[in-house]
Image (tube, helix red, strand yellow):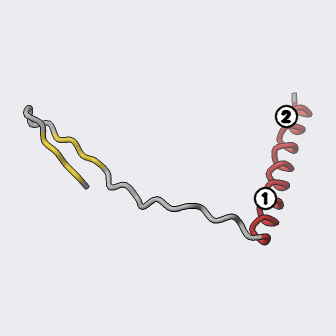
Amino acid sequence: MFTTINEDGVLNNYAVEPKVYFAEYPSPEQQQRYTLQAAIAFGIVALSVLTALAVS
């Protein structure tokens, strides 16, 4: 952590920045997993909306 003190005695703390890197494109297996997760999430949201409509 990098810390400075100004003339009034106020401390300024600066966080250490992480190393920057480029993201890797997901593999076909990861893409299939993301598709399955999206389908499950859509199903949960649709079920929630339909339940709210049925109750109201």
Q: Residue at x 83, y 61 (%)?
A: 36
How crowded is the residue under tag 2: few (<14 C-alpha within 10 Å), some, or many (20+)? few
Is 45 above or below relative to 8? below
Rendered location of residue 49, percent (x, y): 85, 37
On the rendered structure, is 27 left or right of 55?
A: left
> Which image quadrant for residue 22?
bottom right
Quickly name the residue at label 2.
52
Q: Nearer the viewer, mark 2 or mark 1?
A: 1
> Which image quadrant for residue 7?
top left
> Which image quadrant for residue 53?
top right
Q: Which residue is drawn at 16% across and 45% down?
A: 4
Quickly name the residue at label 1.
37
Is 53 above or below relative to 46? above
Q: Which residue is drawn at 74% across and 70% down?
A: 27
For the residues marked 2 and 1, what is the alpha-carbon distance in whole angstroms?
23 Å
31 or 51, nearer to the observer? 31
